[in-house]
Image: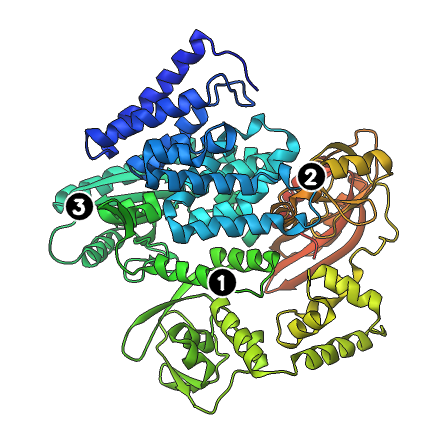
Amino acid sequence: MSSTFTAADEQLIRHEFEKLRLVSLKRCADQEQYNLVLKAFEFANEAHRNVRRRSGEPYILHPIAVARIVVQEIGLGCKSICAALLHDVVEDTEYTADDIRQVFGDKIAMLVDGLTKIKSALDNDNLREEPSSRSMQAENFKRILLTLNDDARIVLIKLADRLHNIRTIGFMPEYKRIKILSETMYIFIPLAHRLGLYNIKSEMEDVWMQYNEPLEYSKIDAELVSTMETRGENIERFVAELEEMMRENGIQARIVKRLKSPYSIWRKMQVKHIPFEQIYDTYAVRIVFVPDKQPSEADQCWSLARMITRRYPCNENRNRNWVDTPKVNGYEALHRTVMYMGMWIEVQIRTERMNAIAERGVAAHWAYKQGVFINEGENGLNRWLKHVQEILENPDANALQFLDDIHKELLSSEIYVFTPTGEARSLPKGATALDFAFDIHTQIGCHAIAAKVNMKLVNLSTVLANGDQVEIITSESAKVKREWLAFLKTMSARNAVIGALKDMGKDNVSHGMNMLRDELGKRGIQMQTRVLRKMIDYYKITGGKDELYNKIGIGLIDLAELDTVLKTNARQRNVQMWGFKLMEANSRRIKSLIDESTVVFRASECCHPIPGDKVGGVLDGNNTVTIHKTSCPEYTNIAATNGDKLVAVRWSKHFMMSYLARISISGIDRMGILNEVTNELSNKLGINLRKISIEAHDEIFEGYIDLYVHDRADLDNIIAAFSRINGIEKVTRSDIE
């Protein structure tokens, strides 16, 4: 979109840049750096002149906004501000990377070039027609993570860019929103979490929820407003008491209060199957203090925690200690949940240094010295980057397997275990003694035969717990075993085992062929060319059947999902015409297909959407579109890794049928309560039941009801009716397994 800028446009541009200029002054070391920021703005402003965004605003407002996020919310410096201002110039205008280099030097040009490559990679509009597009998005994310090892500022600026795009996503077409929001949930939100950018993560999550679960978001937002009205005065009193406590003890501190985000509350409700009323820690209070020189910061945090818990009852199960063992992204704090006037309040205790890390994440760990952006010291982030590098260097993982590995790495929480000499090692939760062995050294892992955990002899598959002391027992004659792949957690250990198996065995092809033949035989299927071709296509094998057998033999391909593979591209049986209507498609291939063929719709069996749910479609084989809730994790994964298959759909207003849904209930058991439930459904609401599963124990009952409804309004009416029945304490919609 382009048209000549008006005087009002020019005034708006200067007004927005003035905000950036003022905050940039604080991050520029000298006049030379400040002048560089001014030059970058003028360069970008001229390059994007008379170009507008979808919103109609001048395009230059986007780079200015990204630069403000970079400096204000992430805390980066001069060169990052310049790169943010210039990040779209090479991709969207006639200027080249060499032009940027000549004007702004090598470092800024390197940052802009990295950002350009990421944008080009994510712009699938140019890639959707490629036969290999199923894995193209995974390859794109791989390129993004490669930049972490070049210069982490590239990814930090990209996160700022994505955040601003999320803030303005309402101007994008439906299919584009689906793609961007799914990418954001699948990779950018976990990446922001891993890099310690919690505020950015939280805002992205809330926007995702606004579009994918709009009704739930509105309900929780209204509940939070109500909570502030009813409990706000108590929180103010609590903060005032803490401030007085700080003054009495001569502690220089500031206290900040905040509400939990709607998304974090919703996720907790989903995971624990509880209503909003049972979320007790909706409020958090943060104490940020200036530590004395002695004793240590950690000791002062503990002293402050004891001071608070002596005065207020503490929920010991909610205590968190990230002072002695910081998170992998460097986060340090003590968390205590205390009772005040009938409500639980989470108290976070941090020093100013800890708070800087919590607010700015990885950026707070980095220092600009002598023109080089370097990391200060060995920390959890460095160790995680090494894990990422090992995954990136694995030549055997296809793009989708790589993305799945990275996704798991991003989401995994960490534990700390210790060597016999007391050295702490960070591992993902669920890691085994053998993972620990490979983390120490590949050769130790390859020759491991057993372990001692807390001085007790255990086998190598033993899952480690936080704080365990581990010693690995080795033997020179020991060799790696294929069975290890079944319990290894870390990608680096798995890759080491796979590499060793390759070197060891020449019988992998034969072994894999026999394994496949046996599994097919169990299903009464012969190993025919048709079956092999289907597997080769599914796993994207390029080296023919021998490569397929080899990967099965060494454990790279898990035959546990064989049934899924065999069903691939099979014509869906008993597919009904559901009540959906196509809106938009996001590729010319899909549009052409829709024009030429009758599209068959089916509701997914993973999330069971019903009218009123926000839904999206996925084009499967044989002109079938599978409908998912857009908040469905499976749909998010598909949209993030196979975005070329997405179609936008909406419910047809003139189509009426029944849809399967599940309601979970629990409460206090009493005579006749089940009869009241079934009477409410059958006689009063006219709802058909499919299944009831209720268990009672110690006068408490819990279970679920599968039933057929027309839409979400039906479901809401049922939930409201059940909530009024005496004895029912909790009623929620839940997933059908």
Residue identified by numbered label 2: 615
Which residue occupies 40% across, 54% down?
A: 149
In the picture of the structure, the residue carrying the numbered disc 1 is 393
Q: Residue 565: x, y in percent?
A: 75, 62
Few, some or many C-alpha atoms within 10 Å of disc 3 (few <14, some 14-19, many ≥20)? Answer: some
| In the image: residue 263, left or right of residue 301 | right
Q: Nearest to the eye among marks 2 and 1: give it.
A: 1
User: Mark 2: few, some, or many residues within 10 Å (few <14, many ≥20)?
Assistant: many
Report the quarter where the C terminus lies: bottom right
Q: What amino acid type should be assigned to the residue bearing mark 3? A: Val
Q: Between 104 and 267, which is closer to the camera in this rendering? A: 104
Amino acid at pointer 1? Glu
Task: Measure the C-alpha gap from mark 2 to mark 3.
Answer: 49 Å
Query: From the viewer's perspective, is residue 456 above or below residue 553?
Result: below
Question: Considering the numbered disc 3 on the image, is that residue within a helix, a strand or a loop?
Answer: loop
Evaluate whether residue 642 shows in this view. Answer: yes
User: Around disc 1, counting alpha carbons within 10 Å, would you say few (fewer than 14), some (14 to 19), or many (20 or more)?
Assistant: few
The mark found on residue 290 in the picture is: 3
Q: Earlier in the sequence, mark 2 or mark 1?
A: 1
Please say if 156 is above or below 383: above
Residue that appears at 72% across and 78% down: 515
Quick one: SS at disc 2?
Answer: strand
User: Percent x, y for residue 612?
Assistant: 70, 35
Whichever of labels 1 and 3 marks the residue nearer the N terminus, that label is: 3
